[in-house]
């Protein structure tokens, strides 16, 4: 589903972000990306939805290759992905319902289909009762749930989450993580970058640790070795 093959990513200003990384993420997997700031976690995520292209090597996501993908191919791929960020990225002047609707409007979903899809997504994240609330009227955890509903509304095969609990307190963090577990259990693959090692240790999901742009630990490889 996601395949990075001997991927190196170098930036003109900051230098090498990833160095000869090979990584596979299978259908329906839940994978944590861990490691210190600057280790390369966010770069892997950006490569996974082809916002960035590798300097060398190949990234392949659901059959779409960085080596041959057109802008149209990338646009089509992203419609099948859900992406969640640490800072929520909600439209402040739109309600929860309108924020989720917007994700469907921009890809041309027929208007008649939007209300049911939005209601289902908000129900899935436990916010049906807050559909008409503006972001400023919601807690941080609730805002992240709206962001997750927005990411889920188009039934993605893969949810990419970049530090989704980074701005949340412990209770909200547990709630968001439980929600991500439920989403994964329903069949959606999840790749989550996090600094929260307690969260990682509390589950038995695959963990990939990065340091200085290289993979230094992969629990899947460790399991295979044992």
Image (tube, rainbow, N blue to C red):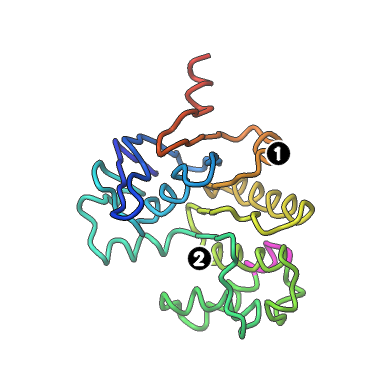
Residue at the front extreme of this rendering: 13
Q: What residue did someone put label 2 on? A: 154
For the point 53% across and 21% down, the residue is 223
What secondary structure is marked by label 2?
A: loop
What secondary structure is marked by label 1?
A: helix
Above or below: residue 69 compared with residue 110 = above
Is residue 205 toward the left or the right of residue 14 in the image?
right
For the point 68% across and 35% down, the residue is 203
Q: Quadrant of the N terminus?
A: top left
**Count of residue discs:** 2
Q: CA distance from mark 2 to mark 1?
A: 31 Å
Is residue 109 toward the left or the right of residue 131 in the image?
left
Which quadrant would residue 22 be assigned to in this image?
top left
Above or below: residue 144 compared with residue 58 = below
Residue 149, percent from left and from top: 61, 65
Residue 213, percent from left and from top: 40, 39
Say whether residue 125 is magenta. yes
Residue at the left extreme of this rendering: 68
Q: What residue did someone put label 1 on? A: 198
Is residue 136 toward the left or the right of residue 94 in the image?
right
Residue 173, percent from left and from top: 72, 52
Mark 2: few, some, or many residues within 10 Å (few <14, many ≥20)?
many
**Overall secondary structure of the magenta stretch?**
helix
Q: Are marks 2 and 1 in contact (CB under 8 Å)?
A: no
Give the magenta range.
Answer: 120-126
For the point 49% across and 19% down, the residue is 224
For the point 25% across and 41% down, the residue is 57
Residue 181, percent from left and from top: 65, 46
């Amino acid at each position: 589903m996601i395949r990075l093959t001997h991927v190196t990513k170098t930036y003109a200003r900051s230098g090498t972000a990833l160095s000869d990384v090979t990584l596979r993420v299978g259908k329906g997997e839940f994978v944590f990306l861990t490691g210190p700031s600057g280790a390369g976690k966010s770069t892997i995520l950006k490569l996974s939805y082809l916002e960035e292209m590798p300097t060398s090597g190949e990234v392949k996501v659901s059959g779409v290759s960085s080596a041959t993908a057109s802008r149209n191919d990338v646009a089509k791929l992203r419609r099948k992905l859900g992406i969640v960020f640490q800072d929520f990225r909600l439209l402040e002047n739109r309600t929860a319902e309108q924020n989720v609707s917007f994700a469907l409007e921009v890809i041309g979903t027929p208007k008649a289909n939007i209300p049911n899809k939005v209601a289902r997504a908000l129900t899935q994240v436990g916010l049906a009762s807050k559909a008409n609330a503006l972001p400023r009227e919601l807690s941080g955890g609730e805002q992240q749930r709206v962001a997750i509903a927005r990411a889920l509304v188009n039934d993605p095969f893969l949810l990419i989450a970049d530090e989704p609990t980074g701005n949340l307190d412990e209770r909200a963090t547990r709630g968001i993580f439980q929600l991500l577990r439920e989403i994964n259990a329903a069949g959606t693959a999840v790749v989550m970058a996090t600094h929260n090692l307690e969260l990682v240790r509390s589950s038995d999901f695959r963990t990939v640790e990065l340091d200085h742009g290289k993979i230094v630990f992969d629990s899947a490889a460790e399991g295979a070795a044992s």
